[in-house]
Amino acid sequence: MTSGPFSTPDPMILPSILSADFSRLAEDCRDILAAGGDFLHVDVMDGHLVPNISFSAPVFKWLRKAFPDVFLDVHLMIDEPVRYAPDMVKAGANNVTFHVEAPEVKNDVAAAAKAIAKLGCHVGITLKPGTPIESVFPALPFVDLVLIMSVEPGFGGQSFMHDQLEKVRTLRPMMKANQRIEIDGGIDEQTIGFARQAGVDWFVTGNAVFTAKDRRATIAALKQAIGS
Ligand code: DX5
Ligand code: ZN
C-alpha cells in the first residue's frame, strides 16, 4: 500500500509518546507536533514480548480523535500482533509494525505481514538487537517499512547501539522506492547523523525530544543533523 507519507523519501522525525506526560497526553503531543515532530510513534507493550507493559488502543484512540490527520505509527511489542492488529487499525493506526520474535508470527512472518496489510493499514516488521536481519527477509515484499531497534525494546531513555547500523547497511540496497527504513532507540543529536549516513529514513525519538528544555530547537537540530 503506497500513499501519504510513503510517497515521499523525505526523512521524518517521529516523537515516541512513551516519553510523553500521560496526564496531559493530547496537549503534550500537540506541543511536540508544533515543535516539528512529523508523525507520532506509539509503543504498545504486553509484558510478554518485552519486559514492560505500556498502553494500547483504548489510550491512543483519543489521539486519533484529537489529531485526525496525524500519521500514527504503532509499534507492537506483543506476542500476538495479528490477533490485535484489527483493534489497532480501528483505533486509528496508520502503520502497524510487528516483531519477528512474536510467538504468533515467527513461523511465517510473510503471512503475518500479508494478514495485517489486508486490514488496509501500512505494515512494518521489526526485530530485537540480537535477532539476525535475515529473519525479516521473507516478509520484505509485503511490508512498507523495516524498523531497526537500536536498543532492547521495552523502555525509553537507553543508549544507542551503534552495531545495529550494520543491519541498516545490509537492508538499504534491498529496499524498494516506496519502502522505508526506520530506527528506534537512543536517537538524539549525537546519534542521528550516524543513522542517516547508514541509510535510515524515519527516526523515532522519545527522551531526547520530550525531555528537551527547548523542543523546537532540539527537533530543528535533529533535522539539521540529517540535512532536512
Ligand atoms: C523502546 C521503544 C521506543 C522508545 C524510544 O522499546 O520502542 O520507541 O520510546 O525512546 P528513546 O528515544 O528515549 O530511546
Ligand atoms: Zn518504538
Image (tube, helix red, strand yellow):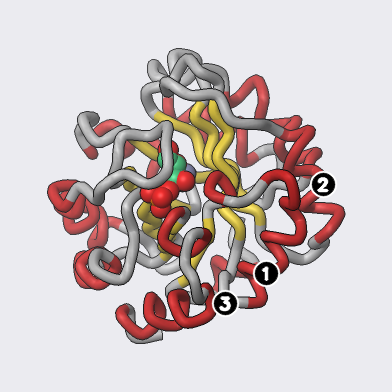
Residue 218 visible at all = yes
Measuring from the top left, give residue 63's x and y in whole percent: 77, 52
Residue receiving disc 3: 36
Horizontal arrangement in the rendering, residue 147 relative to residue 118 (left or right): left
**Residue located beneath label 2 in the image:** 62
Q: Mark 3 or 2 closer to N-term?
A: 3
Residue 89, x across and y down, in percent:
73, 40
Q: Amino acid at mark 2?
A: Trp
| Mark with earlier residue (1, 3) | 1
Secondary structure of residue under mark 3: loop
Return the residue nearer the eye: 108 or 161.
161
Q: CA distance from mark 2 to mark 1?
A: 16 Å
Please tell me how crowded label 2 is: few (under 14), some (14-19), or many (20+) other residues with Cα within 10 Å: some
Q: Position of residue 166 (x, y in %)?
A: 14, 52
Q: Nearer the viewer, mark 1 or mark 3?
A: 1
Q: In this rendered view, identify the residue nearer to me: 221 or 72.
A: 221
| Residue drawn where x is 44% and y is 54% of the image | 207
